[in-house]
Amino acid sequence: MAGEEQFRRVDAARLEQLVADIYHGLGVPPDDARLLANALVDADLRGVHSHGCRWVPTYARSIRAGTVNLHPTIRAVRDDGPTCLLDGDGGLGHVLATRAMRLAIEKAKRHGVGVVAMRNSQHIGALAYYTQMAADAGCLGFATTNAGIAMVPPGGREKIVGLNPLSWAAPTARPWSLNLDMATSVVAGSKLGMAIERGEKIPFGWAVDADGNPTDDPKKGMEGGLLPLGGPKGYGLAVMLDVMAGVLSGGRFGRGLGMKGSSQLYQAIDIERFIPLSEFTERMEQLIEQIKGSALAPGSTGIFFPGEIEYNLKQERLAHGIPLDAFVRGELRREAEALGLRYDIEIE
């Protein structure tokens, strides 16, 4: 399926309302359902479809199966000045992550820095959603999570390392924040799932099959494992992030990631504790101009900062709709119809 049949534009506001109604219909408290919908649609708006509304049916299945606690008792295991360790009691990851980053920001405003570890959480989606909260509050934001085991270490052929992403964000004087959100594998694991859904091959260099051989078959890649970004560098990052998110929090790590739940670490640094925010953004503008003003490669249309392309996509899609593929649209329609909801999101 190609072209107009494969991708159709959907209205962002109607999509967000539909997703919120689906989760509320499944028993998610209204405020939590709206937050989850906003986070998923935000990923699609920014072009990060691997972490967008394609997750709606996955989360719905988990809710129906009772593997997600919709009414968790979130408790502070330890709260000591600028640091806090939270236990999420198996709650919805996006809800727990938002609460953790808000607490990190509050602590940063009080102490200069806030660091919050979270254990017993579910999948939290795109990390940029949370680090952007810190940037919007005049802070430098950092977030990392350990994820399902799907990476093969250099020298091995067994997937034993988690896909442990990271994100940093910083405010600028421009409409967009500098926001780096990246996997430590060559690509996010969800991109193999997307390739399967669309009937596409994957590039060689993304993954290996179960025998450790390079493959362009996403199914064989999921059976084998993803390759680390930059070889030993991405592998080293992934292991250290597992230490920061999983080992430090007392949550799941290593082989334990094959079981229920994940762990995270959130950090906010109050910029005003170092220099005035206005001076910081002025200095950021100098950095941006230096790099953007440097010589371009032949045929280049320009140099972009992490987060800039995503911001531009979001503005365009807020105005003209989000292109969603046929698989995701079909899944959303099925979920809506199962709950007696009206599917009315397509605009072309």
Image (cartoon, grey):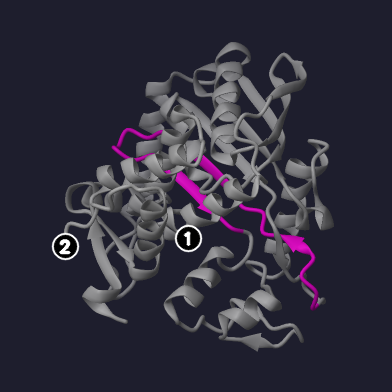
Is residue 148 shown left or right of residue 61?
right
Three-letter amino acid code of the residue under disc 2: Glu
Q: Residue at x 61, y 17 (%)?
A: 107
Three-letter amino acid code of the residue under disc 1: Ser
Reading the chain from its start, which is encountered first: label 2 or label 1?
1
Q: Nearer the viewer, residue 212 or 285?
A: 212
Is residue 39 shown left or right of residue 176?
right
Marks 2 and 1, Cα distance to the nearest angstrom? 22 Å
Query: Element at badge 2?
Result: loop
Q: On residue 348, which mark appears?
A: 2
Position of the N terminus by quadrant: bottom left
Position of the C terminus by quadrant: bottom left
Q: Position of residue 18 (x, y in %)?
A: 33, 45
Q: Position of residue 98 (x, y in %)?
A: 53, 31
Q: Is residue 17 above or below residue 82?
A: below
The answer to whether residue 170 is visible is: no
CB within 8 Å, label 2 to label 1: no
In the displayed orientation, state which residue is furthest to the top.
110
Q: Which residues lie in the magenta part?
A: 157-183
Q: Quadrant of residue 288?
A: top left
Query: Badge 1 is on which residue?
Result: 50
Graded by Cα atoms within 10 Å as few (under 14), some (14 to 19) or many (20 or more), the crowding at tag 1 reads many
Q: Position of residue 272 (x, y in %)?
A: 49, 18
Q: Residue at x 62, y 86 (%)?
A: 215
